[in-house]
Amino acid sequence: MSIITSSIYNAKLDDRISPLSSGAFRFYAFKLEDVDYKEDFIVNKIKVIPRKKNPNLFSGYLYILENTWNVYIADLTTSELGTSLNYRINYHPVKTFVYLPTTYDITLNMNTMGVKGSGRYFASIKYNTVEIDENRKPSAVAEKNIETIVSEMPETPKQQKIFSEIEKLSQKEKLSTKDAYKMSKLMNEATEPEEVKKQRESLEIKDIENVKMEVDTLALKRDSTYWAAVRELPLYEDEIKSYQFRDSIAATDSTVAENDRNEVVLSIDDNPKTVFGRIVQGGTWKINDKMSLKYGGLFGVLKEYNFVDGFWLGQSLTYNYALNKKIGFSLSPSVYYITARKEMLWHVSSTVNYAPMSLGRFSASAGHISRNINAESGESRLMNSITALDLGQNFIRFYDSRFFRAENRIDIANGLHLYTDIEIDKRSSLGNATMYNFLKRQVPENIPSSADMYEAHTASAFTLGISYTPFYRYRVSNGRKWYISSKYPTFSMTYKKGINLFDADNGPSYNRIAGAISQTIGISPFETFNYSISSGAFLSNKRLYINDLKYFSNNMMLFTQRDFNNSFNLLSPYTASRQWWTEGHLNFQSNYLFLKNLPFLQHFSFDESVHLHALSTENLPLYLEGGYSIGFLGLGRVGVFTGFSEGKFNGVGFRISYPLFNMIERPLK
C-alpha cells in the first residue's frame, strides 16, 4: 500500500527520491525524447536519467501533458542487489485539469545469490469524490508574476526576508539549477498553509492515515464471474494459478485445524515440537499474556574464556513481566563456574521501565565477576575470548569485582535527559591462572606493571549526567516515546565523584567533570558529516587507582564491535589520563566519495568514509589519527588508519568493524 499512498509530486515516492521533488535536478537529468500529438492534447515523453546509479533513484520515463503539465504516465524503474522494481502508473482526469493516479502496474524481478523470482502487483483506484483546495490552485499562481505574489502576501519580518530573496532571484536573466532549487524552496515556504507548517514544526511526528482501507467480508467468497466484471485489468494465467494454489492451501489448513481441536497439549509453548530446539539453542517461552521466560540454551553454557578465569561454564535466565503495554519489569540471574580459579561467579540484574513517555528506566545489578579495568569503553569480551584461545593474546586487563550498582535514566523535558548512577565495588588485583591456548604461546601478564598492582579496597562512586538536544523530534508508538532526529547538536555534561564511603584509608577519592558536543548532519541523501568533541579534567585526585583513570575508546584488535566514528585505532593499549584531556572526532561519509564515482562500481552497495581523530592529554600533547573505510549496508566496515604522535609517524593499522557482535554478545554489567 505504500506506493498507493505516495505521491510523485512529494519529495519521496515509495521511500525513494521522486523525479518531481523540489530538488530533483540535484539527482536527475532530464531529456525530451519524443512528442506525441493526440486528438485533444499533446504528450511530452521525458527520459529520467539518474545522475548516480543508486537504489534510491529512479530511471525511466515521464509522460507530461503540454500546457497543464500534469503527469499522464509514470514509467519508472529502480534496482538493488539483483532485484529490480518497475512502476507503471497511469493518471486520468478526475476533474477538469486534475489528473490523479488510477491504475498501478508494479513488476518485480529477482536474480540474486542463485535465487530467481518474479511477481506482479496490479491495483486500480476509483474516486467517488474529489475536493479541490481553491486556495492552492496552481493556475492562480501561474497567472501572476513574482512581484504580484509578493505584494499580496502578509508582511511578517520572516516573510519579508523570504520575499526579498525571491525578488532578487527573479531579477536574474538566467537561473542556474541551484538558483531554481532555492527559489522553489522559498516559494514553498511563502505559500505553505498554516496547518501544514504547524505539523511540520511540531516536535511530535504523527503518521497521518491518508488511506483507510475496508475489506468487504464477501471479498474471498465472490466467484470468478463477479471479479471478471469488476476488474479493469484481467488476471494473467500465472495469477489464476497462484490464486488456485492459495485456495488449496487454505482448505488444507482448515482441515488440519479441525482435526487438531480434539488434542490437548500440556506445554507453555505454542508448538511442543520446538521445545528441544529451544533447550539447545535458547529461546523465549511465553507463559501468559504478561509473563515470559528467556533461556540461554545449551549453546550458552560456555560464555567466555580468558587467562585469568579460564572457561566460564554456566547459564543465564531472564524473566519478563509486563504490568501493561507501557510498563515492564525484568529479572536476569546468571551463575558460572570458572575452571582456572575453580570458583563460582554470579550476577543478577533487574530493570523497570516505569515512564515510557519520559524514557524513565531504573536498573540495579549486583554480582561477583571479573571486570575490565576500562569499564567505560573496553574491548569486546567475546572477541577477547577468541583471540585468547586461538592466538594466545589477551587484550583485556581484568580485576576481581564484588559490586552493587543502581542507575536511573529519565527525561525531565523533551530532549533533556538526566542520568544518575551509584556504585559500590570491592576490588582486588588478578593474575593469570592459566596459559592454555591452541598455539601454545607464552602469554603476557594480566597487569604487566607491578606499579599498577594494588591492595584490595572498596570503591564508591556517584555519577550525575545530563544531556540536551534542542528541538528533538520524536514519534509515539504503543504509548512510548522514540526520539528520531534534530537539526541541532547534543550537549552533555558528566560529573563523577569517588567517595570514601566504606574504606576511608584505601578508597579512591576524586572529582571528575567532562563536557561534550556531538551531531550528525545530513548534507544530502547520500552524504553525512559527523563530529564529536569532548573535554574533561580531574578537579581533584587525592587517591586514584588504574580503574578510576579516564580511558579512551581504542580498537586494539583486528576485529571490533564498535564503529570507527568515535574511537581510536592505533593508540597504545590502555592510554589514559589522570589530570585532563581533550578529544575530537570528525567523520565524513558518502555514497560517492572516491571509488563509487567509477561507473563500473556504482552497481555495488557500499559507502566510503574518511575519519580524523585527535587526542591531547597531560602525557600526550597531540595525537592525530586519519583513516579511510568502506562500509557494506551497515553490516560492517573495513578501514585503514595511520597515526601521528607529536608530529611523528606512529604506524599504520587495518581494522574490521562488525556491529553484529553487539547482538551476539551479552556482557554482564
Image (spheres, rainbow, N blue to C red):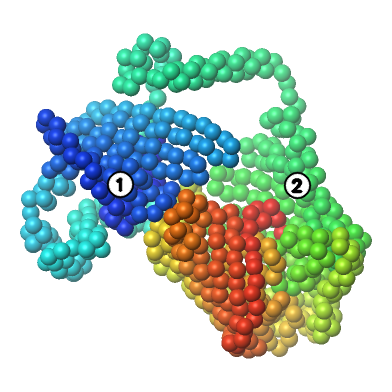
Q: In the picture, residue 26 is in which quadrant?
A: bottom left
Residue holding disc 2:
296
Q: Is residue 291 visible?
A: yes
Residue 420 is marked as none
Who's the residue at 68% across and 80% down the image?
Answer: 576
Q: In the picture, residue 637 is in which quadrant?
A: bottom right
451 and 336: which one is in front? 451
Crowding at mark 1 (Cα within 10 Å: few <14, some 14-19, many 20+): many
Mark 2 lies on a secondary structure that is loop
Taking the image as shown, residue 369 lies to the left or right of residue 92, namely right
Q: Estimate the spatial distance between the alpha carbons at disc 2 and disc 1, rounded to whole Å.
A: 53 Å
x then y, percent, for residue 14: 38, 43
**Residue 377 versus residue 46 in the image, above or below:** below
Q: Quadrant of the C terminus?
A: bottom right
Mark 1 lies on a secondary structure that is strand
What residue type is disc 2 on?
Gly
x then y, percent, for residue 402: 80, 67
Residue holding disc 1:
48
Farthest residue to the right: give it: 342
Disc with the residue nearer the chain's start (2 vs 1): 1
**Residue 656 versus residue 548 in the image, above or below:** above
Q: Is residue 369 visible?
A: no
